[in-house]
Image (spheres, grey):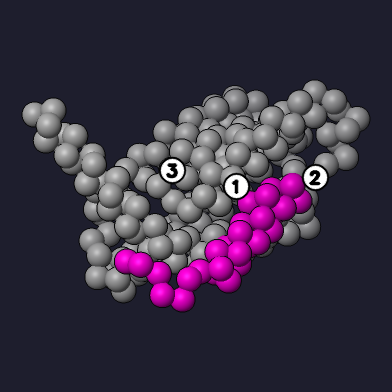
Amino acid sequence: MQTNRAAENLQTIRTLMERSAIYRRALAPILLLAGAIGVVTAAFGFFASVKLSLAFLLLWLGAAAIAMLGAFLLARRQAVKDKEAFWSGPTRRVTQALSLPFLTGLFFSVLPTLMYGGYAPGILNKFIVALWMMFYGLALFTAGFFMPRAIKVFGTFFVISGWCLFLLGSMDKISEQINMHLLMGSFFGVLHLALGAYLYLTEKKNPAA
């Protein structure tokens, strides 16, 4: 039984390594889409003056849901194009690596917001953003073991940035000068566009399948 499991794990690792180029091709359009959604959402939140924590949470969770749906459709289209099974063993491993950090970040942002965010004028926003950045970075770092090295670096940058923002959150005079929508737009918008463009421009012309 253990021998079969070890053989299955070895085959999964080998398949992930062989398909690294495919993941790279799928990641570029996904990151570009997520970045565009992030920029548009940040612009809307900033100009509409969305400040209450509950409204802030709903706005950005809605944007995240749209981005995830778009990522699903793009990944599926890439799988069909390459004549690969979409929900394969390697895909399940990557999904598992992403899911727990995502769900944990969601839990620790939704719970306090539902309790206090309906009437707190943006007090929780900086901590919500810091948590999102940290757990999102952890998810990317974990999934980065199955993806291009740039994803691990990207995830590490998000984690460290989340630490810094969390520390700045206790310094009201500094943190009050930072608009959380613009910060979200910079990290979840502009940086995703930049990484997506990098992966697209550096993609090998004839990647090994």
Instruction: Please name the residue that numbered disc 2 is placed on.
Output: 179
Of 116 and 35, the residue lying toward us:
35
Which marked residue is nearer to the observer: mark 3 or mark 1?
3
Give the Cα distance between marks 1 and 2: 22 Å
Q: Quarter of the image for the C terminus: give it.
A: bottom left
| Residue 160 is covered by the magenta coloring | no
Name the mark on residue 91: none
Q: Say left or right for 150 vs 69.
A: right
Amino acid type at mark 1? Phe
Mark 3: secondary structure: helix
Which marked residue is nearer to the observer: mark 3 or mark 2?
3
The residue positioned farthest toward the left in the image shown? 1
**Residue at image location 39% in from the left, 57% down from the top:** 20
Amino acid type at mark 2? Asn
Name the mark on residue 154: 1
Mark 1: secondary structure: helix
Instruction: Please name the residue that numbered disc 3 is placed on.
Output: 145
